């Protein structure tokens, strides 16, 4: 196949992109089979008072575009400490109301939703304690463990609310937890990736018991020079252990720094993309890859050239990384 979208479809997964309405041009529908609103479904934009959903114009534009072009939508995102807008500081009941409203607003036109985003702390201390929405949690039995049956836990309660809304409305929307620096089993230097372990513990707790609350896990995959954000050889093994819990895994916000110091015209970056795509292809339940933007100039990391195209405003040139990804997808 000669597009990313077609090659991925033949290999049995989606290959998508994050975008805003201003970036919807011919390249998007030609190359990508899935769309994530980069900012327009965040509570900052769509949350009104008391868990209502409002101001959905941009999100509707994206969802309609996806529908007209037979692309899947990954909704991003409901419960997040950042860009929370009118949801910031909400109690669990209001969060639950918002979750139900957001799910019903687009129904099955959104195939996957990030219900909880970036719940884990960067310092490997588990969840972001002391910070909303984690402040909703109560350690009922005082054992320091928020992940058991007796304690309140906003992650569990948010997924429960989402599951109930999906069931009540007869939807097939799948519910994801999404985070960054959780990609490798290890980090630079070979130590265990404690953030990945914390995510694994959460997903295991809420999928292996009587309730199956989580359907999918997003590894954001913003790979760069940070010791915790590098591409490790055990990426595939980490994807596999989540897949073994029965959840789908997505590489949900992929971009990879180009090392500009070696003047290799993007060859190293291309090989890194190849490795990452291969790791997903090798695990059956790794069902999708989404790059976080089209061209380097349009990326949130504009100075770091992490994407598959140069150019801008709909006039794009394919990089070596593009060719590598296409080749790898075509290998299946
Ligand atoms: O739209 C306004 C514009 O009107 C205003 O003039 C301008 C001034 O700063 O800001 C514009 O909004 C910006 C928005 O992007 C749209 O471009 C915000 O300031 C800026 O903060 C926002 O950044 C987004 C960022 O999330 C915010 O957290 C990035 O585009 C988006 O790529 C990024 O995406 C996140 C994921 O949601 C979660 N994972 C990490 C990822 C990268 O940071």
Image: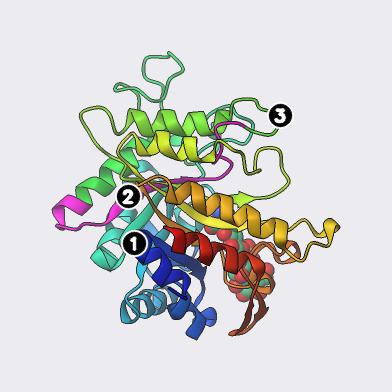
Within 10 Å of the Cα at label 1, are there few (<14), some (14-19), or many (20+) other Cα atoms? some
**Above or below 78: residue 70:** below
Whether the magenta-drawn stretch holds residue 173 is answered as yes
Disc 1 to disc 3, C-alpha distance? 46 Å
Query: How far apart in space, not on screen, are marks 1 and 2 (Cα)?
Result: 20 Å
Where residue 18 appears, x then y in whole percent? 50, 67
Q: Is mark 1 within 8 Å of ligand 1?
A: no
Marks 3 and 2, Cα distance to the nearest angstrom?
Answer: 33 Å
Quadrant where the image shows the C terminus: bottom left
Q: Which of the numbered marks, if any, corresponds to residue 52? A: 1
Stretch of the chain drawn in magenta: 166-186
Point out the frontmost of discs 1 and 3.
3
The location of residue 250, given as percent across then percent down, is 43, 51
Per the image, label 1 sits on a secondary structure element best described as: loop
In this view of the protein, can residue 34 be seen by the observer? no
Measuring 50% from the left and 51% from the top, which residue is drawn there?
278
Residue tagged 3: 189
Q: Name the residue under label 2.
A: 175
What secondary structure is found at the residue carrying circle 2?
strand
Q: How is the image coloured?
A: rainbow
Q: In which quarter of the image is residue 46?
A: bottom left
């Amino acid at each position: 196949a000669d597009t990313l979208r077609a090659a991925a479809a033949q290999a049995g997964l989606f290959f998508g992109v994050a975008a805003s309405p201003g970036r919807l041009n011919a390249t998007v529908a030609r190359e990508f089979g899935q769309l994530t609103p980069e900012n327009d479904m965040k509570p900052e934009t769509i949350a009104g008072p008391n868990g209502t959903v409002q101001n959905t114009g941009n999100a509707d534009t994206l969802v309609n575009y996806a529908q007209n072009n037979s692309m899947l939508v990954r909704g991003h995102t409901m419960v997040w400490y950042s860009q929370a807008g009118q949801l910031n500081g909400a109690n669990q009941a209001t969060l639950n109301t918002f979750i139900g409203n957001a799910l019903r607003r687009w129904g099955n036109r959104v195939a996957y939703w990030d219900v909880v985003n970036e719940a884990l702390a960067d310092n490997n201390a588990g969840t972001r304690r002391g910070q909303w929405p984690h402040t909703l949690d109560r350690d009922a039995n005082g054992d320091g463990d928020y992940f058991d049956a007796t304690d309140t836990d906003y992650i569990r309660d948010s997924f429960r609310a989402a599951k109930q809304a999906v069931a009540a409305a007869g939807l097939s929307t799948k519910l994801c937890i999404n985070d960054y620096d959780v990609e490798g089993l290890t980090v630079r230097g070979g130590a265990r990736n404690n953030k990945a372990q914390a995510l694994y513990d959460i997903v295991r707790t809420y999928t292996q018991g009587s309730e199956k609350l989580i359907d999918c896990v997003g590894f954001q995959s913003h790979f760069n020079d940070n010791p915790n954000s590098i591409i490790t050889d055990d990426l595939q093994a980490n994807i596999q252990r989540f897949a073994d819990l029965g959840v789908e895994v997505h590489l949900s916000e992929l971009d990879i720094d180009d090392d500009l110091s070696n003047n290799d015209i993007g060859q190293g970056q291309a090989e890194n993309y190849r490795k990452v795509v291969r790791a997903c292809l090798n695990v059956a339940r790794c069902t999708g890859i989404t790059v976080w933007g089209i061209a380097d100039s349009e990326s949130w990391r504009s100075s770091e050239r992490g994407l598959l195209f140069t150019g801008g405003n709909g006039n794009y040139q394919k990089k070596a990384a593009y060719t590598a990804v296409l080749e790898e997808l075509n290998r299946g």
